[in-house]
Image (cartoon, coloured by chain):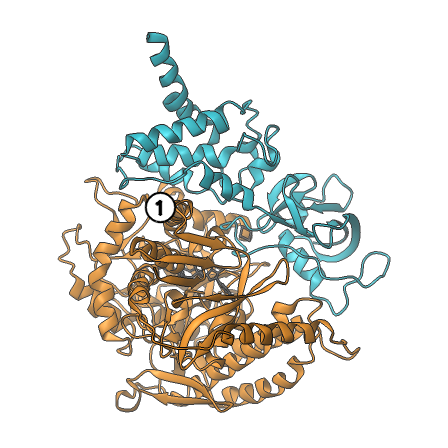
Amino acid sequence: MVESVTVIIKRQKNKDEMSYLEKFEYDGDLNIPIITLLEKINNQDEIKNIEGNIVEPIKFSCSCLQGLCGDCGILINGLPKLACTTFLIDEIGESGNEILLEPFPKFTVIADLVVDKEEMYESLKLLNQWIESDAKVNLDNIQTEYEMSLCLMCGCCLVACPNYSSGDLFKGVPVAINSLKFISQEKDKKHSKELKNNYNHHFYSGCTKSLLCEDVCPMEIPIQRSISKMNRLSVWKLWQLISKI
Amino acid sequence: MKNILIIGSGIAGLTAAIKVCEGGGNVVLASPAHSERSQSVMAMGGINASLNTKGENDSTHDHFKDTINGGKGINNEKAVKKLTSNALNVVKWLGDIGVSFTRDENGNIDLRNFGGQKHKRTAYASARTGKQIVSSLTALCRKKEAEDSLKYIKPWRFLSLIITNDECIGAILFNENTNEIKAFEADSVIVATGGMNKLFGKTSGSTHNDGYVTAKLLEQGVELANLEMIQYHPTTIETPIKRLLITEAARGEGGRLYVIKDGKPWYFMEEWYPEFGALMPRDVVSQSIYKVCNDLDLGIDGKNQVYLDISHLPDEFIMSKLDEVYKTCIRYLNLNPCNEPIPVYPGVHYFMGGIKTDENHKTNIKGLFAAGECSCQYHGANRLGGNSLLGAVNGGWIAAEYALNHESNNQFEDNLINNVLNEEKEKFDIWSKKDISSNSVPLFKIEENLASIMNNSLSIYRNEKDLNNSYDELCNMEKIAIKADSRNDYYSYIRLPSLILLAKAMVLAALNRKESRGSHQRVEYPDLDDENFKKTTSLIFKDDNIEVSFK
Ligand SMILES: Cc1cc2nc3c(=O)[nH]c(=O)nc-3n(C[C@H](O)[C@H](O)[C@H](O)COP(=O)(O)OP(=O)(O)OC[C@H]3O[C@@H](n4cnc5c(N)ncnc54)[C@H](O)[C@@H]3O)c2cc1C
Ligand code: FES
């Protein structure tokens, strides 16, 4: 199917400059992923916006082009999605042949659709997200551990989360699911306790269970189930202990 | 304490980083993006080790033999010996650091069949082996970072090595976000920058792996090898975004290849190769698909495609062990592989050639090591599925050990590093002041042209005429490239001439290997010629000339 689409892109030259919306006209196949759309706009002899002015190529990130690396997360019509697995045809329905592409909010913009996700990684480091011992192997837990390791660090969950904002004590879902995996594998009791404490302070106390994270997770990680499990492990157990005293 | 600079943070770079830290060294790990974005996360099918838990009498010796047979005898045997005997330790170590391998009923790491190997030897983590390995390696690196023995810097692209007296003492890197250019001095450097994907436009792998590091190393006197050995994966699908891979596990778990002949499905691999069927090594399967479509004209719907059928496997099985195949087909083809066969054709997937190393991952330059897909030692003329994840971990591990042991007695002047740095900065200044003339060609067009030349002349079957024409075209392209309009992107501007040089080296390698071996099939020389070519193709850039020899 070929139709004309107005592609609206929130652009920003670098982190210090103001952002602005720029419109492009696209005529072509609609059954293409958004990354392909961006490539088609860029790979022209002259890149012209809707007013006919020649502009610089649109900056965006991608690597695997098949939903495995989390590099290409952007806001598509206001929702956090992977641009390589989201198709144009599915996004122009109600908006009258228009599509709006923006960089993730809550992260610093580097240029156009590219943002700096370093803070996500810093949180994992700060909260000791690793194991100290050799991994415990429990056949009943392997599936859960596997699912927790599917996290792409794409940031969709943090964008959707009503509680997360940059620099806060609350660090969001990546910490919760990593904690579950590492507690399940850790033999070192001290480190397990540390992981549980960190979970309590940096996740449990800030999560209001909107579970929008689960709705937007491109890997369909069972977040609700993992949070319940973590709560059982680290919050309720502690609480039961205290109430016994 | 030794300071080691590691460039590239896929599975090879991550493993090297951890092993250097464990050996008491300090690491700077540099890459354009986090490991979650590396090609390594895309590996699905698995990693080989002769764990022999299936009662099939598997052994490291059989693994060795299969690897050499698959590589048609031009693998570095000493390296393959180490690879296959370390494999057991590698997989055990991965399990210890927390990789969630799929387990069998007995609690052992489960094994599946992969091409070119009669035994069940491929360990896997459901449908996402690479991702699971990266996840555990990054967690360990995080710990090393917190302990301050590792510094992980992003987004830094490699610009050039700092070499003096034939010894590498660091590298100049470029920050793509800030345009900063910086020198990193090191006791040794490990390069782990993946395949040369960009030469072919898009491959089944990551767009981050552009091959620039390999190209620049060639330019700087590092020996490359076997560049003509390019693996076409038999089963890739055509989609608007690129040709996507359908993992070999689909055939390993029972998927069959067929076309329609005389109104009936014809399982050509099973007829031609009754012993292995569709699980012959990849070069053979790809060549067979080529023949079926081009020589016999039996491509499905008259196109270059055959069917890969997994619809006879139980749905639940597909959903658990091959769920990525299911997702990819539904998403990009709107096709349900539980009910319908998948139209596939070979596509560029893996580079057996690259930076030549010995069995200890040393290059011809002192202090410079290479590991993972960018390096060349294990796979010969064709890589077996599941051997490259193994090669990446094993290579990173060994490179770390030897990099730590490297002793330099190089005396260099204090200002040497500054001089090299200033040269790179000057190049940037010249570029930034450059007037783009109105008739200069947009750089992306030259890159597209480069990819089209490479895809045509280095396809599954190569011929002298196309290779010669390509070489001439590449020589012409060099002249246009320096005037290209890179639209304010310095990195792609300096990358292009080096990529063209690398492309020329690849074409020359293919021209000079006048025989057919593994993934290199020459129309004019259809047979193996062990006497002249059971050797490694060596490529060295000297006095503005690419020298090709066979060693
Ligand atoms: C779809 C797919 C499926 C696969 N499945 C399997 C499988 O089942 N089993 C198997 O054994 N193998 C498989 N492979 C092959 C395997 O994934 C790779 O060969 C392996 O992961 C390579 O690891 P690496 O560490 O060498 O490189 P990569 O993981 O490719 O990492 C390269 C690193 O170098 C960095 N880099 C790239 N260019 C530059 C530059 N110019 N400057 C600085 N840094 C740079 C990248 O950012 C990255 O960090 C598969 C490959 C693909 C594409
Ligand atoms: S590019 Fe990797 S997830 Fe989109």
> Which quadrant would residue B385 be assigned to in this image?
bottom left
Q: Vertically, is B285 above or below B254? A: below
* Of the pair B359 and B309, the residue shown nearer to us: B359
Mark 1: few/some/many CA within 10 Å (<14, 14-19, 20+): many
* Of the pair A129 and B389, the residue shown nearer to us: A129
Q: Is residue B403 left or right of residue B41?
A: left
How many numbered marks, from 0 up?
Answer: 1
- Residue B264 visible, this orientation: no
Residue at point 75%, 62% (across, down):
A56
Q: Looking at the figure, which quarter contains the C terminus of chain B?
A: bottom left
Q: Secondary structure at mark 1?
A: loop
Percent coordinates x, y for residue A211 in the rendering = 55, 27
Q: Vertically, is A179 above or below B211? A: above
Chain letter for orange, please.
B
- Residue B17 visible, this orientation: yes
Residue behind mark 1 = B126
Q: Vertically, is A28 above or below B297? A: above
Chain letter for cyan, please.
A
